Amino acid sequence: MRLQNKKALVTGASRGIGKAIADRFTAEGAEVWGIGTKEPDGLAERIAKSEGRLHWVCADLGELEQVEPLIEDLIKKANGFDILVNNAGITRDNLSFRMNFADFQKVIDVNLSAPFIIARTVGRAMIRQRGGSIINMASVVGIHGNGGQANYAAAKAGVIGFTKSLAQEAASRGVRVNAVAPGFIATDMTSAMTDEAKEKTLMLIPLKRMGTPEDVAAATLFLASDESIYITGQVIPVDGGMFM
Ligand code: NAD
């Protein structure tokens, strides 16, 4: 049990990568507050399996003015968090020349602005308690770019920049800040890709398969736990070797 007696906040915990992280964390002994836009199917079973250590919160993190009060309230209810995983994210893909500004802005709001507000709010409390681990979900696209995803790539590059900056600001207070950069992971987010696009992407992966949410959860667990106690300001790719 690597997260015994730890309290974690995980955004986007209803499905995909965030669900795998929240469920792995509870299995490792943590008490987890999961946030998602709505109550997911199978929530009662997940709570029962976690022996009551999973708590659910419905919120739209794209409503930016509501984010800070919501998080402050959760910090009070939980009496502080040891771990934050900023995982919630969306895509609104299009070629830049056709992308309307609302789709650009929405992706920045959910993938970059909300994580910044949440990390700032939780981070302040972690600094007061002199310890904590913040993990931001970036993407290989934030490092390398991707045609058709200018909004998403900009948001994820921004996540990497703010991860490293916050890591520098918080290190002396015992708060670590890192990012995970998944590659091509089998979730709802990638299920909309055409078979042709999936085939092309698979050809670029030396380990010859799509990643699973559990693959990303394992790296996130490492960064959340004391196993990574001497690691901060880093971006860990989980991409099957797609970029070396
Ligand atoms: P997903 O679409 O399966 O799940 C997204 C989660 O975010 C859901 O729980 C959803 O409820 C939540 N969410 C979305 N908008 C929200 C909002 N406004 N308020 C609150 N919650 C919201 O996606 P996923 O593939 O599991 O992706 C999780 C994270 O990993 C995202 O940040 C994504 O950008 C990143 N990522 C995914 C891949 C991939 O290949 N799937 C690759 C790189 C990075």
Image (cartoon, rainbow, N blue to C red):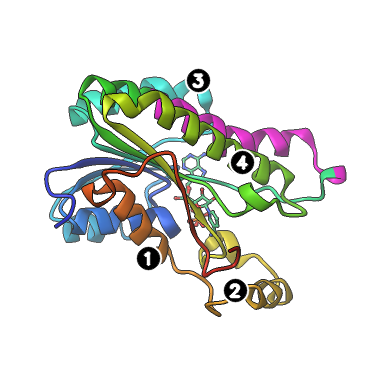
**Quadrant of the drawing holding the C terminus:** bottom right
Asked whether 2 falls inside the magenta stretch, the response is no
Marking on residue 11: none
Residues marked 1 and 4 touching at CB (< 8 Å): no
- Give x and y (percent) for residue 71: 35, 27
Q: What's the CA distance linking mark 2 and mark 4?
A: 21 Å
In primary-sequence order, the first of circles 2 and 4 is 4
User: The residue tagged with tag 3: helix, strand or loop?
Assistant: helix
- SS at mark 4? helix
N-terminal-most mark, 4 or 3: 3
Q: Is residue 218 above or below residue 30?
A: below
- Which image quadrant is residue 28 in? bottom left
- Indicate left or right for 136 with 195 as reference: left
Please give the name of the residue rendered at 38% of the width and 40% of the height, measured from the top-left corner.
232
Q: Residue at x 80, y 42 (%)?
A: 99
Mark 3 highlights which residue? 65
Quadrant of the rendered structure where residue 176 is? top left
The residue segment tinted magenta is 97-120
Which of pointers 1 and 4 indicates the residue nearer the eye?
Answer: 4
Residue type highlighted by circle 4 = Ala
Amino acid at the residue labelled 2 = Ile
Amino acid type, mark 1: Glu
Q: CA distance from mark 2 to mark 3?
A: 40 Å
Disc ID at residue 205? 2
- Does residue 107 belong to the magenta stretch? yes
10 Å crowding of disc 1: few (<14), some (14-19), many (20+) = some
Q: Identify residue for label 1.
A: 214
Q: Mainly helix, strand or loop, the magenta region?
A: helix
Q: Secondary structure at mark 2?
A: loop
- Of callouts 1 and 3, which one flags the residue occurring earlier in the amino acid sequence? 3
